[in-house]
Amino acid sequence: MGPQGVPVLAAALKRVDPEALERFLCVGDLVEHSRCLAYGPGVEPAIPTLRRLAGDLPECGAAIGSIGPAALPTLRWMVTDKNPIIRRGGVMGLEVLGPLAQEALPMLHRALADGDDAVCQAAIPALASVGPKAPKTAPALAGLLTGRTPEIAAAAAKAIIQLGPLARSALPNLRKQLADPDLRLTVARIIAYVTPEDASDAVSILAEFAVSEHGWTDSEVRTCLIFLGPRAAGAVPVLTAALKAPNLNQHVGEHCLELLLAVQPENPAAVKDFQRRLELPDPRDQLVAAEWLVRAGTPGDPARSALERLLIYPQRQTRIQAAGLLLRRAPHTQALAALRDMLQGQDNFSRRQAALQLAMGGLGDRGVLLELERALWSESYDDQELCAVLNALAGLGPRATPLEASIREHLYDLKAPVRSAACLALKRLADTPDTPDTANKP
């Protein structure tokens, strides 16, 4: 939409009944339509209308933030409003603006102590987005780990993890909290992401929980140990001992072997088990096993023959995934030909999936970039799929420069993971965007 369409959309929004929107579950539609106002000059006429609607729909604050720097005065006013719904909308808008809202940092620190829990919780990711490098950000977030509600504490932990190494200033206090039985697991995860090269104290806590009765169902601990990889070598004795326990639960055993492969790719017991899984009759089981082996960088070619068999499997999506895994482990003529062939096909979804696998394999020619650009603007892609495309473009580095404009458009997306992925992709283009300095975390 160009500037000429702004008055039309603003007039339409004035006729919106917020209660009717909520009743008919159209809140998301309103926010999505307001995103049309976010790009290009001349968008200011929509701000008053969105501000009026924010009294009922705080999501409109995020839409205001997506308009860009021109929205900052309105958002600052909203953060000081008496209505907590409007305050929450203002905070959400500042999160979307990111470092462009540096002058509002004191307001966000005050919002952390807001009497309304929803405003406080919204201020947590906003503070991390606006001031990731500010010296007071990480300590302020760490102080909320003992928050007044579990939701606030969880939001604070997530925000610190997103900051990653930028939260090093909070490490002394975090390590003191490892002695708190109620916090030690959460703090151990945070330390692992903030300083992965020096997380031995955290690894021991994570490993002990991972092999506990309920630990194998905790995806956050599992993801954290996988993220650490060989840097979590201290977990090997704990995982190995758990495998020798009498009456070992099958699921716990499989869980321990997966973690062993992640932290010690050459572990004989883990490699042997995944080679066994490669022979299972279900191709989905074979793909999962092959992906674990490829991702861990297991020496040798234990997954190659199984993946080559799947290249002729009737199901198209299975062939695409198998070809992509083959390319990620090493150059492979047959896999490359299979993906190139699908890139020329008639099915839109298969073309884009083939392009994604080619990009993840390090190939970024014109045909691949064309399909990835189409994927960036596909209405059928959810946030997770969109992040996968942006992460693949990040992996291409400067070769993705032709898509810089399309990537930049997502810096003001309403969803934080998409904004972070777009930011990372632009950094890999040797650019310096005015957005949060965050790295993608699992």
Image (spheres, rainbow, N blue to C red):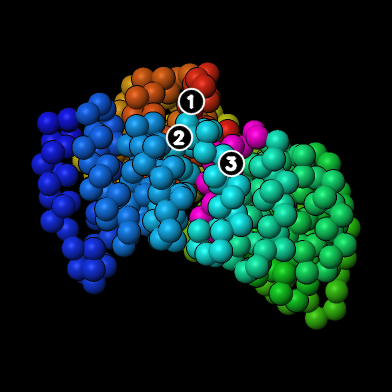
Is residue 19 highlighted in magenta?
no
Q: Which amino acid type is shown beneath numbered disc 1?
A: Pro
Q: Are marks 1 and 2 in contact (CB under 8 Å)?
A: yes
Identify residue for label 3.
106
Amino acid at the residue labelled 2: Ala
In-image side of 303 versus 203 (left or right): left
Q: Quadrant of the N terminus?
A: top left
Magenta stretch prevailing secondary structure: helix
Residue 85 at what x, y percent from top left? Answer: 40, 61
Does residue 428 appear to the left or right of 230 in the view shown? left
Residue 145 horizontal/vertical position (percent):
70, 59
Q: Position of residue 372 (x, y in %)?
A: 35, 34
Quadrant housing residue 357: top left
Callout 1 environment at 10 Å: few (<14), some (14 to 19), or many (20+)?
Answer: some
What SS does tag 2 mark?
helix
Tell me if residue 299 comes above or below residue 223 in the rendering.
above
Front of the two marks 3 and 1: 3
Q: Label 2: how many residues lie within 10 Å, few (<14), some (14-19) or many (20+)?
A: many
> In the image, is 80 to the left or to the right of 292?
left
Disc 3 residue type (three-letter)? Pro
Residue range highlighted in magenta: 121-134
Q: Residue at left 24%, top 33%? A: 43
Residue 30 in view: yes
**Dot 3 or dot 1, earlier in sequence:** 3
The front one of 286 and 192 is 192
